[in-house]
Amino acid sequence: MASDSDKPGFCLVDYVVFAAMLGVSVGIGLFQSLRKTPGHSNVDSFFTGGRGFSAVPVGLSLCASFMSAVQVLGVPSEAYLYGFKFLYMCLGQALNSLITAVLFVPVFYRLKITSSCQVWILSIFHFLLYTGIVIFAPAVILNQATGLNMWASLFSTGLICTFYTTVGGMKAVIWTDVFQIVVMLSGFIAVFIQGTILAGGPARVLEIANNGSRINFNDFVIDPQRRYSFWSFTVGGTMVWLSMYGANQAQVQRYISCRTEKQAQLALLVNQVGLCLIVSSAATCGIVMFALYSSCDPLKTGRISAPDQYMPYLVLDIFRNHPGFPGLFLACAYSGTLSTVSTSINAMAAVTMEDIMKPWLITVSQRKQLLLSKLLSLLYGLGCITMAALSSLLDWGGSFTVMGVVNGPLLGAFVLGMFVPATNKPGVFSGVAVGFCLSLWLAVGSTIYPPTPQIMGVLPTSAGHCLASNATLNSTITVTESSILSSSVPQDYGLQNIYSISYLYFGALSTSAVVLVGVVVSYITGERNSFTLLLTQ
């Protein structure tokens, strides 16, 4: 591997661009906190924005909420390694949007609730853990790939996000999400244009990608161990996204912030368009990256140490003579972080206020309740930063795995409550317990005994034609094929067939377990409760 002195990094102009993005986000939060609107000083407005939003800003906010920096950095790398079939994720997202709009949104909207999750301990645990990963992961990835100071980026983004969420509430969260989605798309578009030019044009990119088996939409093999396929995206992927959009406190707050139920359903359509734009842009950048590095893979040459460093390395490589553009991509990555963190902070504060504290604050004025809500946002923001710092001590987890472990069982609980009239509390709680244990077992097992690249379907890469000592687009390194293939010997574990199941199926399996166990226990115990009773007790 080249020394750190050879590693490309950010310049002053890049940091100025990044700081401008953070400054605009803070400005939006301050503007929303100072803006006087009817009901702006009550708790409901703080958590729902006054329930007066139209479909477009809410839809874009829905889109931004879970497109964290983990996905911004990860999707291009996955497309680079597994091919353009990653676009099938858009199909899973579309099925999720349709199901959520037809089955879930009408229930949440008509109930006029602020908090959807009575299993508040599990919900808060999920948000803290997931948000800590979302803050920490891009900080460490960018530090390893570019030398960006990890702790400075971690604390600056965490504190700024906590500030504008605390002072501005849901209105600040939604409007900063709209701004940040524009920044994310701008970053991907810049990478796509510059990378395509350097690769020789769109036709050349497609030719190289096709020769490298990256144009692979015909993967209809029914194999649950294959990491990505048509079936893993349309079955497993749909359930992953449904658990985020149909049973997630953060998204429910957005549905009920719309002025009408119809606007809430249209917001999901806007969200779908935004998700497809971002996922397709990110995946296309991965294909362009393969066209540039098809014969000189930076991971095999030792220029990077992990697949999630592909994208930052590419950006610094292709924009090394264009100051400011690496800063735009840095803003792109951290826009994803800010949108996700602000969403989680607001959701945790809402759950705590509505489900735990509000019954004890009946005689307390709205002004004091609002101040308490802002204090909760501040405390949860600091908690997320602390969790991010603690994540540096761990070597486990990925964002979708964490979401599947917790969101899958929660989705099962919501399905039972909404669509199985015979469901009762013992059935729900026993189902959630079994589903959570199942998903946690699969997640931990697949981490300890990871599947081999051959099982997952990783496509081949090469480092046989590097041209120069620093192994960038302008340069050489000599790598023998024996060193390239030495790590690809299959390993055999007793439970490998189970632990090798694609992570996209974890949520579907846990949701199914919750529903099955919940129905059986409910019928055995015989105590019947309606969904509305379950929801409010």
Image (cartoon, grey):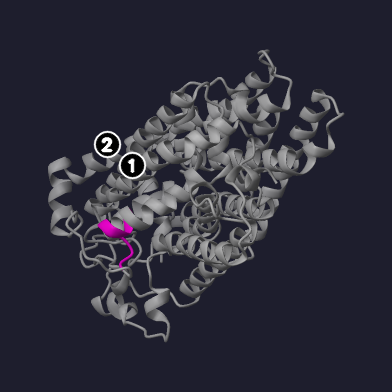
Picture coordinates of residue 528, whole percent (x, y): 61, 54
Q: Secondary structure at mark 2?
A: helix
| For marks 1 and 2 on the same chain, the one whose residue lies earlier in the sequence | 1
**Front: mark 1 or 2:** 1
Q: What residue is at 39 percent from the left and 80 percent from the top?
A: 496
The span picked out in magenta is 226-233
The mark found on residue 480 in the picture is none
- The residue closer to the viewer here, 359 or 71, is 359
Q: Does residue 382 appear in this view?
A: yes
Q: Does residue 19 appear in this view?
A: no
Is residue 232 found inside the magenta-colored segment of the image?
yes
Q: What residue is at 86 percent from the left and 29 percent from the top?
A: 364
Q: Secondary structure at mark 1?
A: helix
Q: Quadrant of residue 221?
A: bottom left
Picture coordinates of residue 60, whole percent (x, y): 45, 31
In this rendering, the answer to whether 129 lies above or below 162 is: below
Q: Tag 2: residue type?
A: Ile
Q: CA distance from mark 1 to mark 2?
A: 27 Å
In this rendering, the answer to whether 223 lies above or below 35 is: below
The mark found on residue 94 in the picture is 1
Mark 2 sits on what residue? Answer: 193
